Amino acid sequence: QQQVKQSPQSLIVQKGGISIINCAYENTAFDYFPWYQQFPGKGPALLIAIRPDVSEKKEGRFTISFNKSAKQFSLHIMDSQPGDSATYFCAASMRNSGGSNYKLTFGKGTLLTVNP
Amino acid sequence: GAGVSQSPSNKVTEKGKDVELRCDPISGHTALYWYRQSLGQGLEFLIYFQGNSAPDKSGLPSDRFSAERTGGSVSTLTIQRTQQEDSAVYLCASNPGGGETQYFGPGTRLLVL
């Protein structure tokens, strides 16, 4: 059972364009939704994260949009640059009994290519 | 400062052999995680250590997989009697206990022939 579904699998965008990656989740107990960025040969690194008490969070060119009723969230990359070319993973987690969001469930990833 | 380090970076082994993968977390980080990343797949949670608490082993796929963490720092993931389907990148992450951001190492690429 795939609890976090991510689309598209791959995305090609021109420099300066907007990249949009979507994720849908099933477990309504999830309350923490991060996006990780992974370059080839490297481990993933946290890009931006959101909790469901807000519908949008923006950090520089990166924005998460969150729709709690639809159980969907998306990553928008404005003014996409060739240096943004990487694999992006959405994830979700719920607090355990100790109050920690440690157990991340990841989507399968989106390979983003930004052409110059 | 130094990030999470993993060794070896690449490992080729024959089916049926045992392998050990090592993770050195960021100094002072009490939480440590292991994930498996198979080709074209997302990251699959394997195991979580937090301080002296019992580890969460719920993600280990079979009893051939085990992990330990000595002295609250270095961790070793052991795969016994490796199978070809064990071929993947094994990623380690750490964070200060209770933190949400996980800091990943570069991974160990395991190929089982």
Image: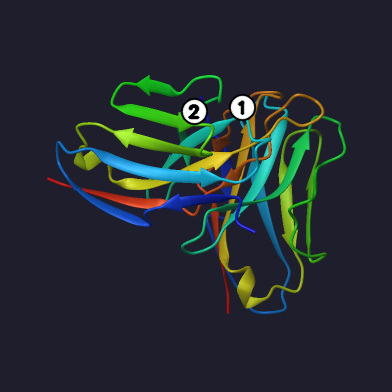
Q: Name the chain under label 2.
A: A
Q: Is residue B99 left or right of residue B79?
A: left
Residue at the far left: name it.
A116
Between B110 and A57, the residue placed more toward the observer is A57
- Residue at 72% x, 78% y is B16
Callout 2–callout 1 Cβ contact below 8 Å: yes
Q: Which mark is residue A37?
A: none
- Measured as percent of width and height from the top left, residue B46 is found at 70, 51
Q: Element under label 2?
A: strand
* Residue B36 screen position, x and y as percent: 61, 55
Residue with the mark numbered 2: A49
Q: Which residue is mark 1?
A: B100
Q: Secondary structure at mark 1?
A: loop
Q: Nearer the viewer, residue B104 or B28?
A: B104
Labels 2 and 1 within one chain? no
Quadrant for residue B64, please give it.
bottom right
**Residue B53 drawn at (x, y percent):** 86, 33
Graded by Cα atoms within 10 Å as few (under 14), some (14 to 19) or many (20 or more), the crowding at tag 2 reads many
